[in-house]
Amino acid sequence: MGVIDVNCDMGEGFGNDEIIMPFISSANIACGYHAGDERIMKQTIELAQMNSVAVGAHPSFFDKENFGRTEMNLAPEQIYDIIILQLRLIAKIARLQHARLHHVKPHGALYNMSAKNPVIANAIANAVKDFDEELILFGLSGSYSIKEAEQLNLKTANEIFADRTYQDDGSLTPRSQTNALIEDTARSVIQVLQMITEKKVTSVNGNEISIKADTICVHGDGKKAVEFVTAIYQSLKQHNIDVKAI
């Protein structure tokens, strides 16, 4: 039997967290910078505990207006600081709930920039390590996010996406392009199984590229998020692949 982690971005106010939670193993909880607040963080952590789901932080640029999806030109020390501030906040709330942070997954523009920029990736990895070296950093499979963290001997999880398309270099297709999102459930399931069982993904140009899969992301804000995550969960079970936190 194989094993894979399934994660979802949560605490972002889309109202489907309670439905999705039973089908995942790791929750990336918004830390108030792009969505959520302390009350929502507390509720989402409680929900994760009820479903035996690992609690993770989902830090972002301070950008609620654009849901954290606008790139910002910050110095490495500024990026370090915003990560630390958000980790302190959610860790404090987690402690009050007798929960412990398990992982960190940057959100939106911060995530995508760190995947392509080793300086940004290094700043994030250093912040995570300095805050708690036992935390696992989730990053785009094979990207600088993973490489820089590994150089610091930080635990990492190569992340793949169930609802996004890929470019030939292994990067995600930018959301600004019309073919960035996968909106067909069957296609999403096929892509997930290909990435897990074959360690490959088919790019938008039809090329097969190698990929490492430790954790699968399903975006909670997707139109078919509930349909996707339930179908993926059922398909994994049918293929004797266990859903379990890293």
Image (cartoon, rainbow, N blue to C red):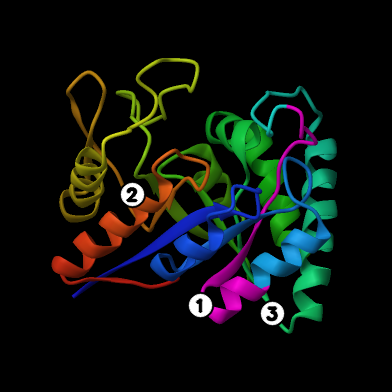
Q: What residue is shown at x 23% (from left), y 42% (from top)?
A: 191
Residue 55 shown in magenta: yes
The magenta-colored residue range is 46-65
Instruction: Identify the disc placed on residue 99.
Output: 3
Q: Could you tell which of marks 3 and 1 lies nearer the N-terminus?
A: 1
Tell me which amino acid carries mark 2. Answer: Phe
Instruction: Looking at the picture, tell me which residue is in the foreground, 100 or 124.
Output: 100
Instruction: Identify the disc placed on residue 51.
Output: 1
Real-space Cα separation, disc 1 to disc 2, in angstroms: 19 Å
Instruction: Name above or below for residue 201 compared with residue 150.
Output: above
Real-space Cα separation, disc 2 to disc 3, in angstroms: 28 Å
Q: What residue is shown at x 53% (from left), y 65% (from top)?
A: 18
Q: Residues within 10 Å of mark 3 (few under 14, many from 20)?
A: some
Q: Could you tell which of marks 2 and 3 lies nearer the N-terminus?
A: 3
Q: What residue is shown at x 33% (from left), y 29% (from top)?
A: 166
> Looking at this rendering, what residue extends furthest in the bottom direction?
98
Q: Which residue is mark 2?
A: 228
> Looking at this rendering, what residue extends furthest in the top direction?
177
Instruction: Looking at the picture, tell me which residue is in the foreground, 127 or 201.
Output: 201
Instruction: Name above or below for residue 109 compared with residue 126.
Output: above
Residue 48 shown in magenta: yes
Tell me which amino acid carries mark 1. Answer: Asn
Q: Is residue 133 visible?
A: no
Numbered disc 2: secondary structure: helix
Instruction: Identify the disc placed on residue 18.
Output: none
Judged left or right of residue 219, residue 105 is right
